[in-house]
Amino acid sequence: MQQKDILIEKFKELFGAAPDCVAFAPGRVNLIGEHTDYNGGHVFPCALPQGTLCAARARSDRTLRFFSLNVPRFGVARTMLDALVPGCGKGWQKYAEGVVWAFRVSGLAMERGADLMFFSDLPAGAGLSSSAALEVSAGLALKTLFGLGLTGPELALLCQKAENSYVGMNCGVMDQFTSAMGREGCALFLDTASLEYEYAPFDRPDVGLVIVNSRVKHSLAASAYNERRRQCEQALADIRSAFETDALCRLTPEQWERYGGAVRDPVCRKRAKHAVYENARTAAALRALKAGDAAAFGRLMNESHVSLRDDYEVSCPELDLLAELAWDTPGVLGARMTGGGFGGSMVALVETAAREDFIRRVGEGYKERTGLEAGFCSAVPAGGARLV
Ligand code: GLA
């Protein structure tokens, strides 16, 4: 039986009737453009085939019920439409509650409750946006149930609002936007300031993407993330005393070299330098992809990792080890940590002919040095959120 059919069967069993709709929203892997999305810069992710299914049914009262097939031991979580308070959400269901809250405070007409049941095949904590997939799948299901007129980008922004204001994670828009707007066979080049985007075909037979899950997730990742944001805001405030700009990533590397000295705190200066150069690398990566230059694309990925490790300081020993093992493997064009950092995954651009050898060498080297079993999967760019 397909996952969707299992979900529908369980829904009927637990909630007593068939769902009105089933929505799917994918996870994402970011190829380059890390920690640029809250600095007004570019990102270059693609949506994955893996993601989250949400089966949903509208209710006639104001009750909300949530259940996840991934954590059935947690049972059914229940709340009321009017009881949602930002910052007070608990458990996995806070992401879905946040979407309901964001819809309602944005003036969308949602005056009845709903039953929502989820299943995800995304590994949690792997840096592949399982929370955005949960939010966007819930958002698409609710939009469908209540006939709300929302475009994909509007849905992404509401889901980001849910995570920022209800959950309390001050993320940028990349994950939700990619989950809502991904396209099969393409990476998504997004300007996070204007939300203009373009799809860049990423479907060569001779090279492919491999995601390597370090299987570590360091605690404090959320607080360190919010701290990086504050450091970037401080750097921007300092820069503005010397140069008029509304976002760090609006600066070219040349402008940075001229005005970056205005950032007084050395740590904030390193953070800002990463943002400026990473944004330039992301634009260069789009040009490399369009020119069919996979080697140049790979070099930019390597530079991105070094900058995230040394200037932004969001990597960790396990991700650095994975990157070094990948860099030492023949047939690897580039490799870098992906996502917010402090654990999670690495993404590598690997020649198809070298893929098996890559998995063996990196897997064995990682196991030998850490005792951990890395997880490998091919990343095939897939479509964004849809009803199934
Ligand atoms: C997390 C956030 C994104 C982005 C990345 C880092 O995935 O949710 O908005 O900031 O980290 O690039």
Image (tube, rainbow, N blue to C red):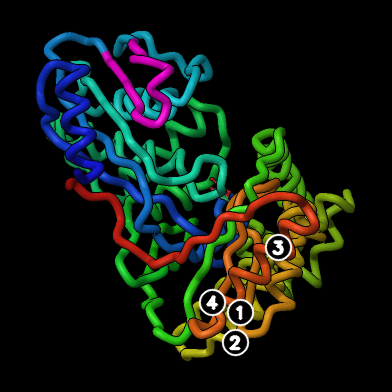
Where does residue 313 sit, x and y in percent of width and height?
Answer: 78, 53
Against 7, residue 216 (above or below) is below
Label 1: which residue?
298
Q: Distance between the residues labelled 3 and 1?
A: 15 Å
CB at mark 4 closer than 8 A to ligand 1? no
- Density class for disc 2 (Cα within 10 Å; few <14, some 14-19, many ≥20) is some
Q: In the image, what residue type sits under mark 2?
A: Ala
Give residue 339's position: percent from left, percent from top.
58, 53
Sequence-wise first label, 3 or 2? 2
Q: Which disc number belongs to residue 261? A: none
Is residue 294 in sight in this rendering?
yes
Residue hosting label 2: 295
Q: Are marks 3 and 2 in contact (CB under 8 Å)?
A: no
At x 66% / y 50%, what residue is drawn? 341
Q: Name the residue under label 3.
A: 322
* Whether the residue under disc 1 has CB within 8 Å of ligand 1: no
Q: Is residue 69 magenta?
A: yes
CA–CA distance in space, label 3 to label 2: 19 Å
Label 4 Cα neighbours within 10 Å, binned few <14 / some 14-19 / many ≥20: some
Q: Position of residue 333 (x, y in %)?
A: 61, 81
Residue depth check, mark 3 versus mark 2: number of the one nearer the observer: 3
Q: Look at the numbered disc 1 and give the secondary structure of its residue.
A: helix
Which one is earlier in the sequence, the residue at label 2 or at label 4?
2
* Magenta-drawn stretch contains 192: no
Task: Tell me the number on the disc at residue 355.
Answer: 4
Q: Residue at x 81, y 50 (%)?
A: 268
Asked if residue 160 lies left or right of residue 265, the reply is left
Tell me how far mark 1 sits from mark 2, CA to CA.
5 Å
